[in-house]
Amino acid sequence: MKRRLSRALGPIIVFGLFIGCWYWVAYSLHNNFSPASGKPMIIPPPHRLFEDFHGAVRERIFTALLISTRTAITGLAISALVGVILGIVMSQAKWIERSLWPHLIALQVTPIIAIVPLMVRLIGANFTARVLVTVIISIFPIVSNTLFGIQSIHPSLHDLFRLQNCSRWVTLRKLQLPAASPSIFTGLRVSAGLAVIGAIVGDFFFTKGDPGLGQLITFFFLNNLSGPMFITALFATGLGLMLFLGFGALNRIVIGRWHESVTR
Amino acid sequence: MTQLIKINNASLQFADGTVAISDTSLQVEQGEFVAIVGPSGCGKSTLLRLASGLISPTSGTVERSASVQYVFQDSTLLPWRTVKKNVALNLELQKIDPAEIERRTNSAIDLVGLSDSANKLPRQLSGGMKMRVSLARSLACEPQLFLFDEPFAALDEFTRERLNLELRTILQTHNSGSLFVTHSIAEAVFLSHRVLIMSPRPGTIARSVDIPFSTDRSQELRYSAEFAEICGDIASSLRGMAHR
Ligand SMILES: Nc1ncnc2c1ncn2[C@@H]1O[C@H](COP(=O)(O)OP(=O)(O)OP(=O)(O)O)[C@@H](O)[C@H]1O
Ligand SMILES: [Mg+2]
């Protein structure tokens, strides 16, 4: 109990400092409060953050949250499926890895905004386009971690399976996938955060279609509603955190029993 | 006597030009225990991989007329499987009937004395216990030929000597053959009927020493004058190689 308390002390102090800075910026900023209504214009101080969080504003934030969550989860699911399959395919032969790797790197380093106009032309500014942006942003860590996980299996373990004349499929199912699963989960957790970024960034670029959190932030910004804008950002953070923690929990359930990184 | 494996004038050159094995012949018969000793890097593991069929010789032939189990230097257990599931692995991969797997797995676990730990995971075991699991996994397959690549190298002297004795006892009832690679001369002499001494660059068998002791061997044998003499003889052969 005492150890848990002292462990929590660090994060609590840092959080306190963060809140302190927030107050300091909010009250020292020139013109932060409207002379007429006294409402915060740029940065609302923490205790006034939820002032406007009711009625239509709350409705809009919840709807947007739902839309962005759906985009992020759909994108992440596709990334996970396609990413793991790509990682497995690349691990099967050196020439496949060599053929695909440069293109994955290219996809990874392409600034997403550079291909948005192309996507609008090709598929329109709809749900599919937003999901596609999410997939492009979040797929790389899953592919590379799957590949890395399979490639770091000890060679004698592969020999062990080869000596029993196992098919590729059996080796994949009984050796490669379970052995790579800690690494795959690491990739999934990183990608979960990226998928939320992808969903919101995609929303920013596509000015048409159902508005998610990204478009809502733009809307609040243009209407000088700094409080709701902050709350929306907070919900975006919360969404990322939920996915991150969700995969952490799933990780513990699936491999926690045997893998050292979890039990320690 | 039935021949389990026969390697005829085999040579092996790796893709990078290294000649690991050169013109090597050996054979193992049923019930025979043959040890291979030699300086590090002389090609012992490569020879064993040739024998197992994991790699093929560049020239010469390998005739295998027996079912083979390979015991690796590290225990090569799957960390997500319990002791019991690990012991069952090879049988499972050979698609053997589940009831038969159950029977053979249990008896192999009994044989290596791990009945109390059958449901533990590898990370809960000591190094010696892990090696016993790896042994049990091979024993459960009831092969005609065992290939051991320094299975006890990572263990302490005491555990190692105890496992040597246990391995002898178990294999005596099996009538299978063994090819056993080791760095320890005493281990080689204690376990085998014949010790092959390998010389390096390129790897080949330089000498074969017959071990005259009866099949009934106890720990006391290790401290006899004759045992020491044979070990000394093999050691000086190996030393001669290092100086060449
Ligand atoms: N895949 C490979 N490609 C090229 N050379 C190799 C390869 N595997 C092994 N060798 C070389 O072949 C020689 C024999 O290696 P091997 O592993 O058989 O030796 P060893 O006698 O088992 O050594 P140790 O006692 O240290 O285990 C070494 O010189 C090694 O560098
Ligand atoms: Mg070796």
Image (cartoon, rainbow, N blue to C red):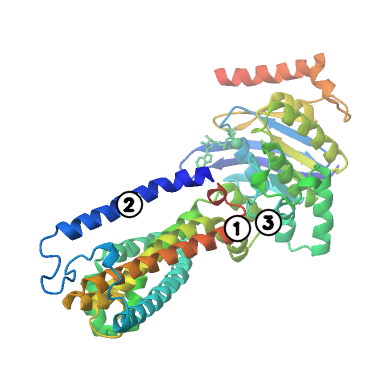
Q: Which of disc 2 and disc 1 is earlier in sequence?
A: 2
Say above or below: A65 vs B77: below
Say above or below: A151 vs B12: below
As helix, strand or loop, the secondary structure at mark 2 comes to: helix
**Residue at 78%, 31% in the rendered image:** B162
What is the quadrant of residue A142 in the picture? Answer: bottom left
Categorize mark 3 by other alpha carbons within 10 Å: few (<14), some (14-19), many (20+): some
Are labels 1 and 3 on one chain? Answer: yes
CB of mark 1 within 8 Å of CB of mark 3?
Answer: no
- The chain to which mark 2 is attached is A
Categorize mark 2 by other alpha carbons within 10 Å: few (<14), some (14-19), many (20+): few
Is label 1 or label 2 in front?
2
Residue A175's disc number: 1
Image position, residue B186 (x, y; %): 73, 24
- The chain to which mark 3 is attached is A
**Residue at 27%, 67% in the rendered image:** A48
Residue at label 3?
A: A164
Q: Which of disc 2 and disc 3 is earlier in sequence?
A: 2
Residue A216 in view in this figure: yes
Image position, residue B126 (x, y; %): 68, 39
User: Gap in Å between the C-alphas at discs 3 and 2?
Assistant: 60 Å
Residue at label 2?
A: A16
Kind of residue indicated by mark 2:
Gly
Kind of residue indicated by mark 1:
Leu
Kind of residue indicated by mark 3:
Gln
As helix, strand or loop, the secondary structure at mark 1 comes to: helix
**Residue at 61%, 17% in the rendered image:** B240
